[in-house]
Image (cartoon, grey):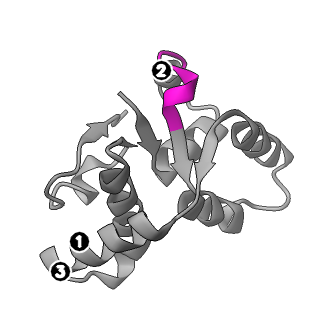
Amino acid sequence: MSYLLDASVVFAAACGEQATLARLARLEGADVATSAIVWSELMAAAPEKDRRLAENLRLIGETIDILPFDHAAATAYGQLLHELEPKRRRVLDRMVAAQARALGRSLVTLIAADFEDIRGLTIEGWSN
């Protein structure tokens, strides 16, 4: 099984949330990635004054693959928009979900309810 981590999981790991870190440690490293969309979202949200968080994000970025949002992901996102009612505030979540679906990866999230309306998406909910 291969996994695509959403922003909630990567952020929780960067903040040192123990349950999330323990679950990540059980996964095979080569099977874990995140989206460039998630990465850009985290880079924009990370406070400049929190050195520990910045360092943890840097280490995560060196440890897991950050996958580009490519042609296949863009096509899957377009298809997803045909299937669902557009929700402007959830655009990035839906783009990441489309990418996971296009890659055949399970989307790992702490907020599974945000993705339950997406057919064909395998979700692994890690609510704490």
Label 3 SS? helix
Residue drawn at x 31%, y 67% as measured from the top left: 76
Disc 3 crowd, CA 10 A, few/some/many (<14, 14-19, 20+): few
Instruction: Judge by depth and name the residue closer to the eye, 81 or 41.
Output: 81
Instruction: Measure how far apart labels 2 and 1 are at the Cα level.
Output: 28 Å
Residue position for label 3: 82
Residue most extreme to the front: 71
Query: Is residue 20 shown left or right of residue 91?
Result: right
Query: Is residue 43 shown left or right of residue 87?
Result: right
Q: Is residue 54 magenta?
A: no
Question: In the rendered structure, which amino acid carries the disc numbered 3?
Answer: His
Question: In the rendered structure, which amino acid carries the disc numbered 2?
Answer: Leu
Residue drawn at x 23%, y 74% as measured from the top left: 79
The answer to whether the residue labelled 3 contacts the one labelled 1, judged by CB atoms less than 8 Å apart, is yes
Q: First in sequence, mark 2 or 1: give its number.
A: 2
Q: Position of residue 53 (x, y in %)?
A: 75, 45
The magenta span reads 25-32
| Quarter the C terminus occupies | top left
The answer to whether the residue labelled 2 contacts the one labelled 1, judged by CB atoms less than 8 Å apart, is no
Residue 80 marker? 1
Vertical placement of residue 125 versus 31, above or below: below
Instruction: Judge by depth and name the residue closer to the eye, 102 or 45.
Output: 102
Residue position for label 2: 27
Vertical placement of residue 1 versus 110, above or below: above
